[in-house]
Amino acid sequence: MKIYVGNLAYRTTEDELRVEFEKYGTVSEVSVITDRETGRSKGFGFVEMLDSDEATAAIEALDGFNIGERTLKVNEARPKAPRTGGGGFGGGGRPRGDRDRERRY
């Protein structure tokens, strides 16, 4: 089960999260999400646990738990929403036509 962990202190490490979650069962993966440009934590991460009962116990125990003077928000991760749009420079604006060419801006 993939678990969302929010409201992390920016200095919280993956190792610290692993230690807390391993108290409730086997942890297969931990990731703290970082900004691509700065490498700094974005204040949230994900923990994957193999057993759903252990994961549920961890969620119940750690939601509202304090790490690094921050109160964690812990719940089952939702599937990533599909991205929309095709990139590019968008569209919109007014249609181009003879009437638009006559105006002087």
Image: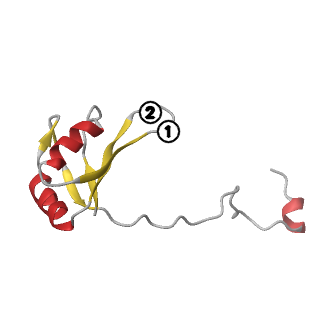
In the rendered view, would you say 34 is above or below 55? above
Q: Check disc 2: other Cα within 10 Å, few if <14, some if 14-19, many if 20+.
A: few
Circle 2: element type? loop
Q: Quadrant of residue 55?
A: bottom left
Which residue is disc 2 drawn over? 39
Which residue is disc 1 drawn over? 36
Distance, label 2 to label 1, CA atoms, is 6 Å
Q: Residue flagged by tag 1: what amino acid is it? A: Arg
Q: Quadrant of residue 98?
A: bottom right
User: Residue drawn at (29%, 34%), measured in percent from left and top?
Assistant: 10
User: Residue drawn at (36%, 37%), measured in percent from left and top?
Assistant: 41
Q: How is the image coloured?
A: secondary structure
Q: Nearer the viewer, residue 12 or 14?
A: 14
The N terminus sits in image quarter: bottom left
Contact check, label 2 and label 1, Cβ < 8 Å: yes
In x, y percent, where is residue 92? 69, 64
Q: Nearer the viewer, residue 84 or 60?
A: 60
Q: Residue flagged by tag 2: what amino acid is it? A: Gly
In the picture, measured across the screen, residue 65 lies left or right of residue 32, that is left
In x, y percent, where is residue 13? 28, 35
Q: Which mark is residue 62?
A: none
In x, y percent, where is residue 48? 29, 56
User: Residue drawn at (15%, 61%), measured in percent from left and top?
Assistant: 54
Q: Check disc 1: other Cα within 10 Å, few if <14, some if 14-19, many if 20+.
A: few
Circle 1: element type? loop
User: Residue drawn at (44%, 33%), measured in percent from left and top?
Assistant: 39
